[in-house]
Each structure stands twice: as C-alpha cells, then as structure tokens.
Amino acid sequence: MLSSVLVANRGEIALRVIRTARALGVRSVAVYSEADADLPFARAADEAVLIGPPPPARSYLDAAAVLAAARATGAVAIHPGYGFLAENAAFAAAVIDAGLTWIGPPPEAIEQMGDKINARNLMADNGVPVSEGSREPVADADAALAEAERIGYPVMIKAAAGGGGIGMSAAADPEQLRAGFETARSRAERFFGSPAILLERFLTSARHVEVQILGLPDGRVLALGERDCSVQRRHQKVAEETPSPGVRPELRERMLAAAVRAGEAVGYRGAGTVEFLVDEPAQEFVFLEMNTRLQVEHPITELVTGIDLVEQQFLIAEGSGPSFDPAHAGSRGHAIELRVYAEDPRRFLPSPGRIEDWTEPAGPGVRVDAGYTAGNTVTPFYDPLLAKLCVHGADRAQALERARAAVAGFTITGLRTNLPFHAELLASAEFTSGRYDTSVIEGMRRRS
Amino acid sequence: MTEVRAEMVANVWKVVASAGDTVADGDTLVILESMKMEIPVLAEAAGTVSTLAVAEGDVVQEGDLIAVID
C-alpha cells in the first residue's frame, strides 16, 4: 500500500478521503487555504499545509502550490477529491511527471471526457446513445440558430469545457437562444477558461441517472449500479437515491453495459461516473457526460454495495485489483443522500456565516459525511455543501422513514440551511411516489 | 429614494449599472458572487442611480449598501 497521500481538496470530501487513508494505514497530508484552517479536515490529517489565501485560484486551484506541499511533506500520492483540480488533465500529468502516484484516471481519459463535444462524438462512435446535438463547437449566435433549427427546440446551451451543470441554460425558441448564447459564452470563458459552446436537444421531462464505474488495472471496467440524481435546483443536485425508482431491470442492464463501453472507450482506470438522461415512459436513455473522478454522491453506492470506493481508488492507483470479488458484487436495500447546503430553503440563495450549534443525527443506517462542525465559519469562497446526510434501509420505504428521522435530528444553527427543504421533499407526494423527474422541485414550488 | 442592499456576504463580480443611469424596476445593477453562484442585484424601483457604492472585486457584507435609486 502507498505510504502517504496528499489530499488536494477541502471540506467533507477531504475528510472522507483522510478517513479511508487512516483505515488503510496511509499517512495523510491536507492542504488548506487561510479560510479553512479550523475546518475538521485540516485538523484530522496527520499533517496539514497552508497553501494560500482564500480565493480558489490562489489556493486549491494552484497546482504549483499543491505540488510544492507534496514535496515538502514527502507525500508519495495525490488524491484530488472532486472539483478543483480533479478533472484537470495537465495537473494529473504534472503529478505523474513529478514521480508521484495520481489517484485518478489516466490524464488522456480526463482530457477526452473533459471536452464535452469530443466525449459526445466518442460515445456515439462506440455505440452509446447520445441526444441530437453539436458534433463541433458552435462559433457564434447565427451558427447557434442554424444548429438549433437542425436539432429542434428546445435546446440546451452548454460549455464544451464545462460540467456539473454550471453555466447551462435552456432555450425554447430562437429569441431565447440569441439571449442565452452570449451569456453562456462569457460564463464558459469565466468558469472553464474556454468560450466553446455546444447545443443539445433538451429533454423536458427526463430523469438524471448515472452509473458508477471502476476501471481495473487489467483493463476490465465494472459497473456498480446506478444513482438517480433528478432532484436538482439550478441544474445542480440536491438529493440522490439508489436504485432509481424509474429504471426497470431491463433498462438497468442496458445502461450498465453502455457505461462499461464508455469506460472501455477511453481506457478508464479508477472510479468514474457515466451520467445519462432517462426518458422514463419510453425506458430509453442518452449519454450526458462522464465525470472522471470520485462523485459527490458516491456514499449511496457504498451503502448498498458495502464497497469502500475510496479504498478501491487507492488499490487501483497502486496497480492492485479491487478488495471485493467482482463476480459477487451485489446491491442490498435502498439508499438516499441529502445534500445539506448553506442556503435558504425557499429561494436556495447562499447563506454563509458562523455555525453556532452542529448536532448530527445517528442511528441504524445513518451516515453523515460532514465538512464542518460547531464554531466553524462558512465563507463565500467555496460551494455551499456543509454535509451529506445519507441513509440506508432494507427498502425505499424504510430509507425514506430513516431519512425523515435523520433530517429532524440534524441541528445546525447560526446560518440558514436547506434542511427544511429536505423535510418538505421527504413529505412530498412528488418525491415519495418515486414518479419524478428533474422538474420535481419546480413542481413542488408551483403547488406550495 | 430606494436603497438597494446586499442580502448576503458576497464578492462583487460585475458592476452593470453606473451612477447617473436611468433604470427600470427589475433592471440588473450589479452581479454578486457567493459560493460559486451568481446573484444579480436588481433595481427595486424605477429611477436614476444616484449612488453606486461598490466596485468589481469588493467584498460586501449582509446589509451593505450597493446602490441608491432616486
């Protein structure tokens, strides 16, 4: 096993990785910005290095500072978590060039999937269904209008270098497309450093379902079931569950096979996620994007499979097989993740501030991956995720019951959180029926 | 006179309006950024922007003055 690892991230995911490192006897090194010195992850690591001021560009995105911290502490491997440098192919290559072990997929796989147009084309060429959309970047507003005419409205305007739903917008007609196109370009430039835009046919009532894959050192790609991530606000996930209530066994089989083909097409190694949009009535699906890293919502897969995905990442990075027998990897029960955000539960606007009281729920099937605790300050510099509240039950009804009790048992004071929203979600007919799509929150809001 | 104030701690990403501009109710004055989200700050009344109290790159606290519309 690797002797040490530097975790190039912050918050709950840094703590999550440190936890598995500790269980495996791997020395952990945290890096932190001036804003995060008091957070649990910086204190939990065996060693912690200050790498810069609060703005991400000057700390967690500063590749040179992260590599310098690895040298200074003698860390032999780097785990990037998600976000920040996790899907930066140049950083992955720099880690490898520095003689360190990169706990992630090959840089070439990151690069191929990072360009969303290239990824779409590659998937289509490998028999993975894709929606109607651009095969090359859309140069300007006029080209976008012509392209949308060919694809058919409504269309989704996306950053080719983007992901995670940031900077995405839908257009129902040419007027909206013209208005949305320039905004999308400037956001793409700002968030992803490239103004390249693609258009895709927008499915108005689709479920967002993704498949967890693991690429093994011998080239095999395993699919470890799906996660339904349809509960979203502003195209970003708020709650996830597995298995998906909208995927029948025959569709699951096809989606898992497509995810394996996607991984094989890029020579994938390690943990990755293939995202699809599912047309539930038709039981059909199209490729959305591939996330070449550990996913935020990976714990629900861990709960139903009993597999520690971070442990598999460590094992695969050092060239070993998985810790489980792939022939007998199964799934048991139902799991739900609720993302606890520092935001008001009504309009979902950010609510940074100082946490006064922090009391986590406990009980059978309850798991909390937290990034903060009492006395910490949540700053405006990073995303609003405070904790992931996960529950596991024998079936969906029991998971829902445990989720309701866990939400009621979670106390965070001093700032606004979306816990009241989660209580509302778990009580809503839309969610409890299982018959929902990505418009579930809008539907709840229209009703109330 | 209408005072427009920040609803939360945020960074000023973009200043859209300038002092002296005539604005309609609902026009975007500035765009704040907090927790990786853009938050447009809108004019709450029609009129003339008599004061624009922030510049791009500033950090505003909850309740800080952003603009005055006369």
Image (spheres, grey):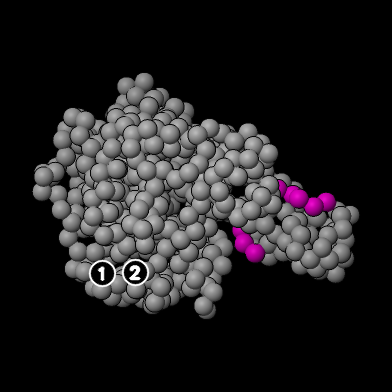
Mark 1 secondary-structure assignment:
helix
Q: Position of residue A414 (x, y in %)?
A: 50, 68
Q: Mark 2 points at which residue?
A: A434
Categorize mark 2 by other alpha carbons within 10 Å: few (<14), some (14-19), many (20+): few
Q: Reading the chain from its start, which is encountered first: label 1 or label 2?
A: 1
**In this view, A107 is above or below A204:** above
Which residues lie in the magenta part? Answer: B7-18
- Front one among A183 and A412: A183
**What residue appears at the point 46 percent right and 71 percent down from the top-left corner?**
A421
Q: Does the magenta stretch include residue B9?
A: yes
**In this view, A368 is above or below A288:** below
Mark 2 secondary-structure assignment:
loop
- Circle 1 chain: A
User: Would you say residue B41 is visible in this rendering?
Assistant: yes
User: Contact (CB < 8 A) between labels 1 and 2?
Assistant: yes
Left or right: residue A123 versus residue A325 is right
